[in-house]
Amino acid sequence: MAMTTLGAGMQAHDHEPAVSVARSMPPVSIAPGRFAGQSVVEELLRQHEDRPPQSWFARTLGVAPLDANGLGWLRAAQAEMIVGDILTRLPDDYSVYHSLPIRSTAFWVDHLVVGPGGVFSINAKTHWDRDLTGSPRSIPIGNHAMPYLRDARFESAQITALLAAVMPAASVVEPMIVLVNPHKILLDRKPNAVTVIDSPRLRRWLVARPRTLTPEQQAAVTALIDDPATWRAAPQRLAPAHLHARFTALEQQVAAARTRRTTFTVLAAAAAATLLAAFTSPLIVAAVEYLAVR
């Protein structure tokens, strides 16, 4: 078995701040003006709107404001934002775009990077602290074989077709899958046509790509990407800053509920230990006295 690490535009700057899920402002993005994870955030908030508001009692007990499906969407958005933060550290001659809805499909590309080394479509996935094994056809998560590789190739082909008018002959958009901070990934062999990498190695990998685009070709590609007509019109009921603020508030609610549940669990365990001690102490004393008089 060959081991491989699985490692997404805005104008990027080459500095190394710590990557964190906590954010006070949405990541800045150049036109078409969408922030990292925006498509996922829009779907998460749409689903959350259909849930009845939590009661005071439920909030006090730390009942999670999201069901398992909602938590999955939240983690997916967090993964895209983490990858988006990483991409802010690319050199100035890279351009990065987020959540671009692909024309004539129901897909969107999580991150699109244009640099001297080419054009890269990046799918961000999150499966923290797990060992993952798989084949070049699929990546199993739990008992399910996820078609990440197939989807990455499809998105790459669609974007290649959209940019074909300004791309150099025979050039293609390179598909990538970035797993956010996985524990270990084992693949049977290197996936065909898809780069799979872990998030800590993403920036270094992109910067190390040999030059395949001239500055003029890069400018032509970014001009086409900047044109909203290149992409499927995405319904946007709220401004990106408002969307991001609502997502951050929901994140904080989920974290606060988790803290309350942990607190209640610790208090319950302490109370149980106290009751057990109060119940058993007289028995222990009586047993000691009984043995002492024999």
Image: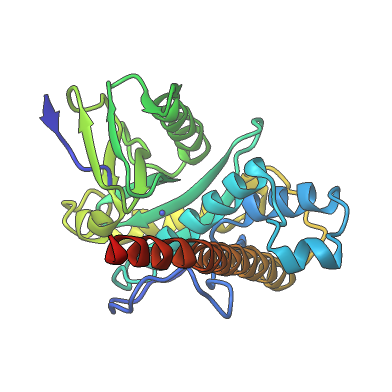
Note whether residue 9 is visible: no
Q: Is residue 186 above or below residue 260?
A: above
Along the line of sight, the residue nearer the viewer: 157 or 265: 265
Q: Residue at x 50, y 73 (%)?
A: 22
Farthest-out residue, front? 294
149 up-or-down from 229: above or below? above
Where is residue 278 drawn, in percent x and y? 52, 68
Q: How is the image coloured?
A: rainbow
Q: Give left or right: position of 198 versus 222.
A: left
In front of the other: 142 or 290: 290
Looking at the image, residue 195 sits to the left or right of residue 271; the answer is left
Q: Seen in the image, is 37 located left or right of residue 186? A: right
Does residue 85 show up?
yes
Where the C terminus falls, by quadrant? bottom left
Which is nearer the eye, 272 or 265?
272
Residue lying at 37% horizontally and 22% vertically, measured from the top left:
138
Identify whether 126 is placed above or below 146.
Answer: below
Would you say 48 lies left or right of 272 here? right
Report the quarter where the N terminus lies: top left
- Position of residue 39 measured from the top left corner of the image (x, y, whole percent): 64, 50
Q: Position of residue 27 (x, y in %)?
A: 53, 71
- Between 58 and 31, the one lying in front of the other is 58
Count the labels in the image: 0
Q: Quadrant of residue 236?
A: bottom right
